[in-house]
């Protein structure tokens, strides 16, 4: 699986994707991440990548030529072109699984300022993807989230793929609470049953302590039964 991330700010993506599990997956060649600086595809001496919007309005718009050339530099007939956008379809766990099944090469185009000249949408008919119902300053942050979410679903990226099975968002319930050593911390003890070695009782406890997922009430349930 390969990701080409097209951005004006390569360093933003290199940080979060250059550590830990994702970095290991890159070293082991399970995934490939290529960061493309859109500014390298400008052709004036100031490397101008943005301009004022036609029709007026606040802010600047990313010019179409450098974005077009950057896309052409990595596009193949197999590429899935995605524009990171707050106006896009929301990236959910379900949607992430569909992406993993349907594509092996993602070109992630990251906006900045007011966004990208709309002719890029007209030329490529890309899928617009939002990472959540809020507005970021920059699409590179969203692209890093996209790569992380999609990559960890790819077999071999997580050391233990069982981790994926029980997780929050796999069903409409949250994962059960997790504990490790020490057994007692600040007056709070690990539930006795988890120390019992009784797998049937442990399973029952785990199931009982999953919560129906709801962003409103999940914080109400910090205490286990
Ligand atoms: N003027 C744009 C609008 O109202 O839709 C917002 C532009 S935003 C300041 C700059 C860039 O950040 C966008 O072009 C997009 O690439 C990225 N971005 C912002 N919020 C995002 C989100 N929720 N999901 C994905 N990308 C986002």
Image (tube, helix red, strand yellow):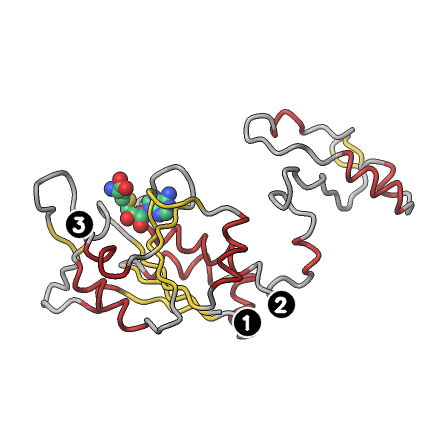
- How packed mark 1 is, by other alpha carbons closer than 10 Å (few <14, some 14-19, many 20 or more), is some
Q: Secondary structure at mark 3?
A: strand
Residue marked by disc 1? 30
**Element type at marker 1?**
loop
Q: Determine the image quadrant of residue 28.
A: bottom right
Q: Mark 3 = which residue? A: 61
Mark nearer the N terminus (3 vs 1): 1
Q: Quadrant of the C terminus?
A: top right
- Are the residues at dot 2 and dot 1 in contact (C-beta closer than 8 Å)? yes
> Whole-Å distance between the Cαs marked 2 and 1?
7 Å
Tell me the residue that label 2 is attached to.
156
Q: Is residue 104 above or below residue 82?
A: below
* Rendered position, 28 above or below 38: below
Find residue 83 and report its horizontal and vertical position in percent. 33, 54
Q: CA distance from mark 3 to mark 1?
A: 36 Å
Task: Tell me where residue 50 appears, x and y as whole percent.
Answer: 15, 54
Q: Which mark is residue 74?
A: none
Residue depicted at 75% across the width and 34% down the height: 209
Q: Quadrant of residue 11?
A: bottom left
Q: Earlier in the sequence, mark 2 or mark 3?
A: 3
What residue is rendered at 57% in x and 63% in y? 154
Q: Secondary structure at mark 2?
A: loop
Q: Position of residue 143 (x, y in %)?
A: 40, 55
């Amino acid at each position: 699986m390969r990701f080409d991330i097209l951005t004006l700010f390569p360093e933003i993506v290199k940080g979060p994707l250059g550590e830990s599990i994702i970095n290991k997956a890159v070293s082991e060649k399970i995934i490939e991440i290529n960061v493309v600086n859109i500014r390298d595809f400008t052709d004036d001496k100031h490397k101008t990548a943005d301009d004022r919007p036609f029709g007026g309005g606040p802010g600047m718009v990313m010019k179409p030529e450098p974005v077009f050339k950057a896309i052409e530099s990595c596009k193949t007939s197999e590429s899935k072109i995605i524009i990171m956008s707050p106006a896009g379809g929301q990236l959910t766990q379900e949607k992430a699984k569909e992406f993993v099944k349907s594509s092996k090469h993602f070109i992630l185009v990251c906006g900045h300022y007011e966004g990208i000249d709309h002719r890029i949408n007209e030329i490529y008919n890309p899928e617009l993807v939002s990472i959540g119902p809020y507005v970021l300053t920059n699409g590179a942050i969203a692209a890093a989230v996209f790569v992380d979410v999609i990559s960890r679903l790819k077999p071999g990226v997580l050391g233990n793929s069982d981790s994926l099975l029980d997780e929050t968002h796999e069903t409409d319930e949250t994962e059960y609470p997790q504990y490790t050593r020490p057994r007692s911390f600040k007056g709070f003890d690990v539930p006795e049953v988890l120390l019992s070695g009784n797998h049937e009782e442990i399973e029952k406890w785990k199931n009982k302590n999953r919560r129906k997922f709801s962003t409103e009430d999940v914080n109400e349930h910090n205490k286990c039964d």
